[in-house]
Amino acid sequence: QSALTQPRSVSGSPGQSVTISCTGTSSDVGGYNYVSWYQHHPGKAPKFMIYDVSKRPSGVPDRFSGSKSGNTASLTISGLQAEDEADYYCCSYAGSYTWVFGGGTKVTVL
Amino acid sequence: EEQLVESGGGLVKPGGSLRLSCSASGFTFRSYNMNWVRQAPGKGLEWVSSISSTSSYIYYTDSLKGRFTISRDNAKNSLYLQMNSLRAEDTAVYYCARDRGFGEFDFWGQGTLVTVSS
């Protein structure tokens, strides 16, 4: 169960779009449509943002969207806002009822 | 208001044991599968273990090698993690997380810090 690979950081100006990639293998990201994303402000509880690759829980702005191609999932934040500055983590089903997270990506709003 | 509150963290020596608790309120605890997820200092999140709503199904990350035991008491609305033979690499903030579906960790506690050091 190796951690999924995410870029350490991405940045953008307010109003711009940023995309965070999450690369795994055919045993996790590529093999199942159970990818979720979490926003984490340090010191706080992580927040559930995306599930089943591209579905948004109620209350999550539609600026957040998810997708997947092959072994790589992506989270796109459109219309970047100051409050979006946080760490973001992907998570994928890895078989046998186990889960694997990515290493996390720090999003900076310039 | 839905709440998950972890407790039981602290400083423990290598080889020692610790029992974490997660107290749930504001929702029907017995209806949900629950998980423990940890974050080592400067590292990403790591899924540790899950337990089904009735404790019938329990799963762990491979790296634990049988040192940790997850359990729950639905009558007390509580989730537990018994951690034995602790190592320095177990140092982390431990979060409990509710699963509303299949890998949909929709609600998390604030975490409790476990430090393993001599």
Image: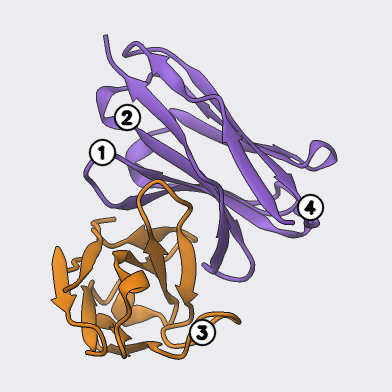
Chain colours: A orange, B purple
Disc number for residue A56: 3
Marks 3 and 1 on same chain: no
Q: Is residue A93 visible?
A: no
**Residue wearing tag 1:** B41
Does residue B109 appear to the left or right of A27 in the view shown? right
Q: Nearer the viewer, residue B105 or A29?
A: B105
Name the kind of residue labelled 3 in the image: Arg
Where is residue A29, by image quadrant?
A: bottom left
Residue B51 horizontal/vertical position (percent): 62, 49
Quadrant location of the N terminus of chain A in the rendered image: bottom left
Could you tell me which chain the residue with mark 1 belongs to?
A: B
Name the kind of residue labelled 1 in the image: Pro
- Label 4 packing within 10 angstroms: few (<14), some (14-19), many (20+): some
Could you tell me which chain the residue with mark 2 belongs to?
A: B
Measure the alpha-carbon separation of dots 3 and 1.
29 Å
Does residue A31 appear to the left or right of B105 in the view shown? left
**Residue wearing tag 2:** B91
Q: Nearer the viewer, mark 2 or mark 1?
A: 1
